[in-house]
Image (cartoon, rainbow, N blue to C red):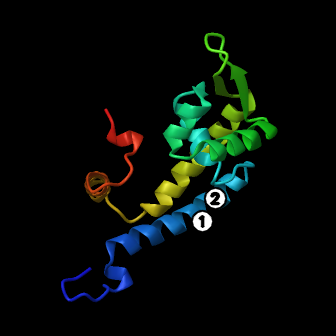
């Protein structure tokens, strides 16, 4: 907020601009992946499993920053769609690992070009140099907010 105590105009507010850009990005991305039977709410789980197939339910919750019951509900939906399967751990019977099915991998293969298209649309008139600067600023923005008490992203670690 400016020193005057007045709210900045929405178009001058970094927070509002990020929120509004995410809103539109989500809208466009959701429509693209819906064609493949995937909702925006299920996407983080699929993405996490694409990076680390075989995560336990708890690990998956941590990766996507969701609470356990939300993760269980998402896994249930993904399993009903045939995109993932649960497998009890052979080394620790209390743990259940989540694996992408062949159908799940095929859906990811179909969604990958959609992601690329949405990114190209969003960055159509942004030079490669501006894109890299934008990424650097967003990373710094996230790091600053984590330092101020925000939840860490897995991307902040390591």
Above or below residue 105? Residue 45 is: below
Q: CA distance from mark 2 to mark 1?
A: 5 Å
Q: Which residue is mark 2?
A: 30
Where disc 2 sits, the SS reads helix
Above or below residue 124? Residue 1 is: below
Above or below residue 19? Residue 132 is: above
Task: Name which residue lies at 43% across and 62% down.
Answer: 124
Residue 103 is drawn in which quadrant? top right
Observer-nearest of 81 and 147: 147
Assign the N terminus to one quadrant of the image.
bottom left
Residue that lies at the very extreme toward the left in this rendered image: 3
Tally of marks: 2
Q: Position of residue 2 (x, y in %)?
A: 22, 82
Q: Which residue is mark 1?
A: 27
Residue that lies at the very extreme toward the right in this rendered image: 80
Give neighbour class at mark 2: few <14, some 14-19, many 20+ (Cα, 10 Å). some
Q: Which mark identifies residue 145?
A: none
Q: Is residue 145 left or right of residue 49?
A: left
Residue 157 is drawn in which quadrant? top left
Q: Position of residue 16 (x, y in %)?
A: 40, 74
């Amino acid at each position: 907020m400016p020193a005057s105590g007045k709210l900045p105009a929405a178009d001058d507010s970094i927070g509002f601009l990020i929120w509004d850009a995410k809103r539109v990005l989500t809208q466009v991305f959701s429509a693209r992946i819906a064609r493949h039977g995937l909702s925006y709410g299920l996407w983080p789980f699929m993405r996490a499993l694409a990076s680390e197939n075989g995560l336990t339910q708890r690990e998956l919750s941590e990766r996507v920053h969701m609470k356990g019951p939300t993760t269980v509900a998402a896994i249930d939906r993904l399993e009903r769609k045939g995109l993932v399967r649960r497998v009890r751990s052979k080394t620790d019977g209390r743990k259940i690992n989540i694996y992408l099915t062949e159908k799940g991998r095929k859906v990811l293969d179909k969604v990958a070009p959609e992601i690329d298209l949405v990114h190209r649309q969003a960055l159509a008139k942004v030079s490669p140099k501006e894109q890299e600067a934008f990424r650097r600023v967003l990373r710094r923005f996230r790091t600053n907010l984590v330092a101020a008490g925000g939840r860490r992203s897995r991307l902040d670690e390591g």
